[in-house]
Amino acid sequence: MKLKIAICDDIQEICRDLESMLRQIENKYNYTFEIKIFSSIKELEKSFYENDTDFDVIFLDIEFPNEMNGIYLGNKIRNNFFKETIKIVYISGFEQYGKDLFQVRPFNFLIKPLTFSKVEKTINDIIKIITKQKNPFEYYVEGKKYTIDLYKILYFISDARKVTIKTLNTSLIQDTFYEKISNIHEQLSKSDFFLIHKSYLINYHNVAEFQYDKLKLVNDETLNISQTFRKNVREMRNRKMGEQ
């Protein structure tokens, strides 16, 4: 497994220690990491403007002296650069950021000083998710085969036997094809897709918030969970939380 990883912290010692941990994890599991270190928010932000950077993971400090903080950049990554698939892991010496972090949808929040075991678990959890959704979904429109990466899919919605794919990238054409949504559910059950309605099949990893009768996706779209599926969704959510 190969990951592009950014570390952004103004304390060089923390960057070096975290990079050392990542190299140990890389060797232990035979992963391949491409690691870039940034000493300021502005430096990391600049990389997005200049290189259209596409990191898989960013370890991002929150507190930076005399400049914007990590939460500001996290929001910009999500809402300006539209990088919904980047796993942001915040690191901080303080614990009071819970509500502020919610809008950024971080993958994890680690308290300094960082420990090898917590960094190791975070990386392995990320790789587990990427592995589940690394294979593209194949479908046919008028006899022509198309593919789309699973992680880009928000959900499938069906109308009779017509299924439409809703994606993270709103500029993409939302393709419609003929298939039973039950067949797609069976095909993708091991990739963390689940039903909230007989016509809606959701990508678990693109859900930002669960509530009793509805959920919010990472694009801020809210979908209702039908009464028939609420128990199944709640049990699935509890099971997934137990795996983390």
Image (cartoon, helix red, strand yellow):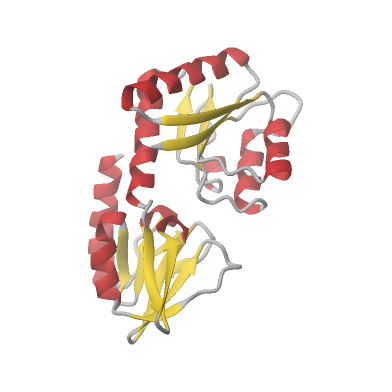
x, y percent for residue 159: 37, 84
217 sits to left or right of 133 = right
Q: How many marks?
A: 0
Look at 38% across and 30% down and name the residue there: 31
Which residue is at the far top?
13
Residue 74 quadrant: top right
Quadrant position of the N terminus in the picture: top left
Which residue is at the far front?
144
Residue 147 quadrant: bottom left
178 sits to left or right of 187 = right
x, y percent for residue 73: 65, 40
Quadrant position of the C terminus in the picture: top left
Which residue is at the far bottom?
160
159 versus 53 height, above or below = below
x, y percent for residue 94: 53, 24
148 versus 117 height, above or below = below
Residue 203 appears in the figure: yes
x, y percent for residue 166: 47, 69
Which residue is at the far right?
66
Residue 208 appears in the figure: no
236 versus 68 height, above or below = below
Look at 29% across and 70% down and name the residue there: 184
Look at 41% across and 67% down and name the residue there: 155
220 sits to left or right of 137 = right
